[in-house]
Amino acid sequence: MHNPNQPTNEHLFAALPAFIGYYPSEALVLVAVTAADDDKYLIGNVMVQDLTTMAAEPTSSAHAFLQAFGNEPILKVIGIIVTDRPHDLADLPLRLQVNDFTSACRTASRQSIEFAYLPRFSAGATWIGYCHAECRGTLSDPATSASALSLALEGYQIHENRDALAALFARAPESERAGIERLVAAAATAVRAEDRAGDVIALRTRLGRLDSAISNAREGALPHSDEHLADLISAFASYHISMALITVADQTNYAAPAGNLLLHLLRLAPTAEGRQIAAVLAAVSYVRGDGTWARLAAEAINPPANLSSLIMEGLHAGAPHAETASVLLDHAHNARRTLMNSAQT
C-alpha cells in the first residue's frame, strides 16, 4: 500500500540540491531514503560521484557507496545519473555501467537500487527510470522546493556548481595574509600559554569575543581590521576554545553566521590556526548534517587537523551520523561548560 508520507521522485529529486549545497552535473547522485519515527520518510546520506569515475569503474564505485552507506538503516536507495551529454536516444546513458553497479551491490549486500536518468537539476527536466521507459516524471523547481526555502531561512544558498561552493573555502593570497600573520604569531603564543596554564578567565574572555563576532555576523557584520582579525584567529590556538565553538551547531539561528565568520577567518588565517578553524567549521557542518560543507572544510588545509581527519573518516566509512554528531556536541558542551563554570568560581 502506498504510504501518503512517501515523497514522489519529483519532489525528492528537487530537494537534493538544497541537501548537497549545489546543483550537481555530470554526476552520479546516490540517495538513501530512511524512515522517521512518525512514519514519514527522510533523506538520509547523499553521495555525489563524478560520472567519469562511475563510468570507468562501476564496481569500485558501488563498493565505495556500500562503505559510505553501510551503517545506515535504509528503506531504499535511489541512484540518479545526471548528464546532458548526447547519448543513444534508443536507450539511457551508461546502461551497462548501471547494471554492473547494481549487480555489485546485490552481490555484496543484497541492497537494491532504483536508478533514474536526469539531464539536469532544473524545473521541467524529465527524469526517466532505468527499470522501464514508462517510469518517468517532470522535475519541479529545485530553487523553490521546501528544502531550498528552509536552507535560505537558515542563511545558506544553493550554489551553481561544486566549484562555486568550493571557492568559499579558498584562502587569500599570501601577500594579503602577511600582515595578519605577524600579529597572530605573537597573540597565539599568549593563547597557547593560557591554554597550558589553564587560565580559564583569559580563555573565557577570548571565547566571549568570538561569540560576539558570531552575533555580529548574524547582522551581516564581519571583522575587517587586522588587529580584530588577529585577535579572533589566534584564539583557535586553544583547544578548549576551538571545541567550545562547535556548540553553535546546536543553535539554528547561529550556525550559518558562525559558518560565515569561520570562512572569513579561514581565508585570512596563518596555516596553523587556519587548520584549527577548518576543523571547527567541518565539525559544525557535520553536526548540521551538511556533508558537503564538512568535507570541503576538512580538505581546506593539508595536512588536516586530527578532528578534520576523524570527520573525513566518518564520512568515508558511513559512521552513523546521529551518534557521531552527539559525541562531537557532548565534547563541545563540556569544553564550554569548563570555561564558563570554572571562570565563575
Image (tube, rainbow, N blue to C red):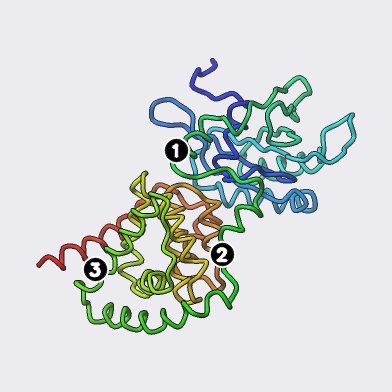
Q: Residues within 10 Å of mark 3 (few under 14, many from 20)?
A: some
- In this figure, which residue is indicated by the disc labeled 2? 299
Where residue 180 sits: x, y (%)? 46, 77
Q: Is 30 on the left-hand or right-hand side of 214?
A: right
Tell me which label, 3 or 2, sits earlier in the chain: 3
Which amino acid type is shown beneath numbered disc 1? Answer: Leu
- Name the residue located 31 percent from the left edge and 62 percent from the top edge: 244
Q: Tag 2, which secondary structure?
A: loop
Q: Is residue 138 above or below residue 301?
A: above
Quarter of the rendering containing residue 93: top right
The amino acid type found where label 2 is placed reads Glu
Local secondary structure at mark 3: helix
Depth check: give the residue in front, 61 or 139: 139
Type of the residue with mark 3: Thr
Give the position of the N terminus as an image quadrant.
Answer: top right
Which residue lies at the image location 52% right of the left edge and 70% below the top edge?
A: 304
At 76% across and 19% down in the image, what residue appears?
134
Q: Quadrant of the C terminus?
A: bottom left
Disc 3 vs disc 2: which is toward the camera?
A: 3
Which badge, 3 or 1, comes first in the chain's sequence?
1
Can you name the residue that lies furthest to the front here? Answer: 225
Q: Is residue 327 visible?
A: no
Distance, label 3 to label 2, CA atoms, is 30 Å
- Residue 153 got which mark? 1
Residue 316 occupies which quadrant of the picture? bottom right
Crowding near pointer 2: few (<14 within 10 Å), some, many (20+)?
A: many
Q: Which mark is residue 205?
A: 3
Q: Position of residue 172 (x, y in %)?
A: 57, 69
From the viewer's side, name the closer residue of 82 and 99. Answer: 82
